Each structure stands twice: as structure tokens, then as C-alpha cells.
Image: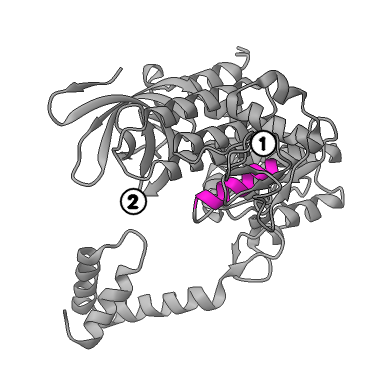
Amino acid sequence: MYEGVVQDLIDELGRLPGVGPKGAQRIAFHLLAADPADVRRLAQVLIEVKEKVRFCRTCFNVAEAEECRICQDPRRDPSVLCVVEESKDVVAIEKTREFRGRYHVLGGAINPIEGIGPDDLRIRELMTRLADGTVTELILATDPNLEGEATATYLARLVKPMGLRVTRLASGLPVGGDLEYADEVTLGRAFEGRRLLDV
Amino acid sequence: MAHTVGVSLYRDEGVVLRTQKLGEADRIVTLLTRDHGRVRAVAKGVRRTRSRFGSRLEPFTHVDVQLYVGRSLDVVTQVETLAPYGAALAADYPRYTAGTAMLETAERLTVEEREPAVQQYLLLVGGLRALAGGEHDPGLVLDAYLLRSLSVAGYAPSFGACARCGAPGPHRAFAVPEGGAVCPDCRPPGSASLAPEATALLAALLTGDWAVADAAEPRYRREAQGIVAAYVQWHLERGLRSLRLVDRTTPEGGQTVRATGDA
């Protein structure tokens, strides 16, 4: 046990995800030895992130205003809506520079064993967005794992009566990988989604 | 079949029950294995898109797995798919939710890790095969699985003779705390009243008489489902989280009925 505030700092750091008691101690002593200006900047950012950042009222992505930058951007196509699980998925898709539509962040995936059902996600808000008829294509970009697939199935069934074009991101072989290491489900999907090579 | 390879390496067949994220790219995978019971193991790097495990360690997958004995958790070294039930289940929401309730039950009924539970394992594999095969209503497959897994665990309900005095049935009252149908003399206050058709359905689900079960009318299915849910929640102290999220869309009416668990 350390004295007073040093121990408090170690305890607080130890509550962060992925930080154990030894890691917390190492970070605490790094901060003690660091330049005061650097530590002050870190403290300032920590406070600011809690004060300024909120969820976009339209798409529920993290935002610094009522609406996020993507929802405010008039150049983004409002007729194509991409549904993702988390804000970090928006960032991953934005990095591709392939997509010019808008997003809807669900806040997770349906996972009954963990007690997460459709009512715990922002599905009601998605249905409200779809109701005015602006969106013509819904891209389901939930994770390609069991929970993500089940969530996509649930959403596809839910929006079916609306007559939208509903698409799912393709899944198959990772670029740069070896065919022999692909598992049966992934390789099967790659066959299912094979495309015509028009040269 | 399982056999030991060296001292600290072993091979077994199992069903992936649950996965939890661990660190940057790993997962803790809970498996119900044939010979080693419920095992928790680390799958290193499984969340990376280029992981050699790929989708093999997703819940519902029936796998042939090689594990290395670790200090607290074992480590997955190799996996081969025996049957990828997850793909079929995730493509059908009612089946997916029924399947998750089965996985959670299997985990809860195998209390001790590494305690062999062959019957529970075989029951789960059979249940998932039936669910993915799509021959029966997913709600019925789930109810049959729940009744049978509780029976294997030592909580077999009685749908014929009175659970208290043994008077021959059928009886119309069902008392969850007594463990089954009860005669008018033994009937405690608060017992549920069951239609004879619902009792017949429950008995058919327990014994695997699918001709009777498949022919049951939706209203008796709902009655039976309520009894099963109440029976499960009574015996599993904390209750099943996934049971309340089971989507029981009836093929006849397309109406969604969720199990309440408090029937």
C-alpha cells in the first residue's frame, strides 16, 4: 500500500478495462515522473471528454454537438443508411472512403445470454428514422459474428414490410490471407458471394 | 473420441456455449465437452480477421478441439468444425433465441468445471441438431430440451402420477414446487390448472414423442411453454436471462409471443 493520493491513483487506474494492479502501478509511477504539463493536458482531456462528448441525436454516434459531423454534412447521401453496432465501426467504415451515405449506431448487438434484447438497442429510433421514406437502402453492417448476424436477421425481418432495399456487408476471405487457413463457414460464404470476373 | 496427447495437451469434442472478450484480440471460450465437462479456455488472437480459428469458436459450433492445460484457464491450440450450427440459427431469429436459451441452460446445469457431463453434452448436441434441422417448431425443441436437461440434472417433472402422493393421473393441476402434476387432494394453493392436451404435450416433449408434440394446437403449446418456463426458473435459482428474450413467433398467426417465465 502506498500513501494517500498515490494509492488512490493506482486504485482508479486499476478500474479501467484491461488494466491490472501491476499495470496500474506502472502507469501511476509513469505519471508521477512525467512532465507536469503533459499530465495536466491528460487531466484536461479526461474532463473535456465527459463534458463535451454526447451522442448524436439522429444517429447516436459520438458527437461534440447535438448532431455529429456526418449527420450535419449536406453532401452525405440521406437515402442510404448504414447500421453499425458501435461508434468505432463508423470510424472503420469511414477509413475505407467507400461509403457516402449516413449511419445509425445501434449501441451493441442482440445477445440473449448477456440479457441484451432488441429493446436494449436503438432499434426503435432506427424505425422512426425509416418511417419518413427518405431512406431507400438499408445496409446492415453489424459484426460478422453470431450476435451480429442474428441482429441483422432480426432487423431485416422487422423492416421487410417497409419495402426497402436491405443489404448485408459481404463476408468471405480476408485480403492477404491464405485459402487453406480459412474456416469452413467463411470459405462457404466466399463461395456463396462469389462474383463474376469481367475482364 | 477424446484421447490424451502428452501430459498437458488434450483433445475433446465440444459445443461452444459462450464467448467473452479478453484483452486486445483474445476471447475466453466456454465449451461443453464430451469427456471434460464444462471447460473455459483462452482462444488467442481469435478476434483478428486473419485468425486461423476463424468462425470455428463462435457459440453453437460443434467442434473437435485440442487444448493445452493452463494454470487457471486452458488454451485452445487447434480447432476443427464438426457442425457449424450457428450459421443456420443466426439466419432465423426465433431459432437463434431458442438456441441461446439452450446454451445458457447447459452452462447453468453443469455447475462444476471439468466435471464430466456426457448426458448433458449429448442432449445439447441433439437439441442443436434438431433446432438447426428445422423439422420442428423451435419453441417445442427448446421446451423439450429444457425438460430433458432438467431431468438429467435430477429435476425430472412428473406429468402422470401425482408428484406428492403418487395417485395415478392424469391430473389437471400442476404445482411447480412439488415437481409436477398433483391430484385434487394434494393440490397446494396457487397451483396452475392445465388442459389435458397441454399435459399430454408436456409428457410428449419429455419422452420425445414428436408426432404428438408437432400436432399440438398453439394454445396448448403456450400453456405448456408457461409451465416449462416456470419450472426452469424455479430450479435455476437466478433464472435464465435469455428465456425472456425467446421469440416465439407462431407459424400459424405470425404473432410474436415472448416467454414470460412467470406463468
**In the rendering, at what x and y percent does residue A166 appear?**
74, 35
Residue at image point 28% right, 38% down? B114
Quickly name the residue at label 1: B93
x 61%, y 42%: residue? B180
Instruction: Report the side of A128 relative to A84 (left or right).
Output: right
Residue sticking out furthest to the left: B7
SS under mark 2? loop
Is residue A137 something that shows in the picture? no
Q: Position of residue B91 (x, y in %)?
A: 64, 30
Q: In the rendered view of the protein, which quadrant contains the C terminus of chain A?
A: top right
Q: Position of residue A11 (x, y in %)?
A: 28, 75
Residue type at mark 2? Gly
Q: Does the stretch in magenta take in A112?
A: no
Q: Is residue B159 above or below residue B235?
A: above
Residue underneath mark 2: B23
**Residue A156 visible within the image:** yes
The stretch of residues the image draws in magenta is B225-236
Which residue is depicted at the point 70% across and 65% down?
A57
Give the distance between the C-alpha atoms of the residues marked 2 and 1, in whole angstroms. 30 Å
Dominant secondary-structure state across the stretch colored magenta: helix
Q: Is residue B231 magenta?
A: yes
- Picture layout, residue A138 above or below residue B208: below
Residue A41 vs residue A17, the one in the foreground: A17
For the residue carrying disc 2, how many other residues have a C-alpha within 10 Å: few (<14), some (14-19), or many (20+)?
few
Q: Amino acid at mark 1?
A: Tyr
- Label 2 close to label 1 by CB (< 8 Å): no
**First reached walking from the N terminus: tag 2 or tag 1:** 2
Q: Position of residue A178 (x, y in %)?
A: 38, 20
Residue B202 occupies quadrant: top right
Q: Are the residues under marks 2 and 1 on the same chain?
A: yes
- Which chain is mark 1 on? B
